[in-house]
Amino acid sequence: MDLFSPVRLGDLELANRVVMAPLTRMRSGRAGVPRDIVVEHYEQRAGVGLIITEGTFPNDESRAFAGQPGIVTEEQAEGWRRVADAVHARGGRVVMQVMHGGRVSHPELTGTRVVAPSAIPIRGEVHVGGGVKQPFPVPHALTTEEARATIADFVAASERAVEAGLDGVELHAANGYLLHEFLSPASNQREDVYGGSPENRARFVIEVATAVAEAVGAGRVGIRISPEHNIQDALETDREDVLATYGALVDGLRPLGLAYLSVLHVEPGGELVQELRTRFGGPLVANSGFGRITTREEAVRLIEDAHAEAVAVGRPVLANPDLVERWRGEHPENEPDTRTFYASGPEGYIDYPTLPAAS
């Protein structure tokens, strides 16, 4: 296999195997509506095989960041329609990452309560906007009925995304947010059907994926996980429990026939990820950017060694709108400007030079 060859992920036909990883950029304002610069940002990067949008909140209590986009209102959906149209006009493919922030939030961000599997706060502080930090609050533990209502919100958000013209959705079950919080024994100490055993902790995520797949079509749905990431207090330090939990998860996902499984892990070619891939039974999108940058050489090797069907990259595509062209020709790359990652304006967002401009 070749990194620059076409590939099919479920119903998604990709021109190459380079995937833009979901990257939080906070450019959608208080209303959570993708603005002109958001449309331009994604349009510029349409040369990758698939764009995964930044995490997008499916209901008000799921908002995790100031400036995060949503998919709750008609105005938000229309903003995403403009993104989809712009990417498609350049021959690209784009799916929305649907993300519930769970306890990684604050009432000043959600405008309402903060929820989680259990009433266990994260240690530390959260940015609430305007350079202000607040301690993470004690979240409200979702009741069984509320958890099931949250599944309905994932479904409604996914339907809005597809109706707005996006090619599908990716469920965010990684990085310590709500779905990941259900998987981790540190953040999930429930005593109902969604807590306790590895199988029970995987149940909520499986039910979300099942409901979304039934609503929009399994071939349009991917899911992202990050086992052993140990981020935002969603700790997973016992390899045996990790394998039991994520094994139960992928075993439950396999019959659905999802488009892909995206795994963020420092060793994408290692035993854990490859076993999960085998048990999932579908395409793997590998992401080795576990706090580091995935290089061209690593991406090429992952595909050539048949460790994945596609590779998700973050900072390289952030700083290089024409990353596929640069990687194909082995051209030098722009360096990402970390100062502008979480700003609100166009600098460091839509002004990175492409090869013709650079030359």
Image: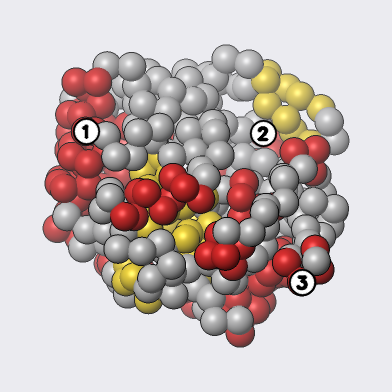
Residue 202 place in picture, x, y as percent: 25, 37
- The local secondary structure at tag 3 comes to helix
Residue type of the residue flagged with mark 2: Pro
The disc, 1 or 2, on the residue closer to the chain's N-terminal end is 2
The answer to whether marks 1 and 2 mark residues whose Cβ atoms lie closer than 8 Å is: no
* CA separation in Å, label 3 and label 2: 46 Å
The answer to whether marks 3 and 1 mark residues whose Cβ atoms lie closer than 8 Å is: no
Observer-nearest of 125 and 15: 15
The disc, 3 or 2, on the residue closer to the chain's N-terminal end is 2
Badge 2: few (under 14), some or many (20 or more) residues near its Cα, within 10 Å?
some
| 273 versus 348 height, above or below | above
Q: Residue at x 53, y 76 (%)?
A: 92
Residue type of the residue flagged with mark 3: Pro
| 307 versus 218 height, above or below | above
Q: Is residue 207 visible?
A: no
Label ID, residue 107: 2
* CA separation in Å, label 3 and label 1: 42 Å
Q: Which quadrant holds residue 201?
A: top left
User: Where is mark 3, residue-wise?
Assistant: 356
User: Where is mark 1, residue-wise?
Assistant: 271
Q: Residue at x 66, y 72 (%)?
A: 43
The disc, 3 or 1, on the residue closer to the chain's N-terminal end is 1
Please identify, in this view, whether the residue under mark 3 or under mark 1 is nearer the observer: 3
Position of the C terminus by quadrant: bottom right
Badge 1: few (under 14), some or many (20 or more) residues near its Cα, within 10 Å?
few
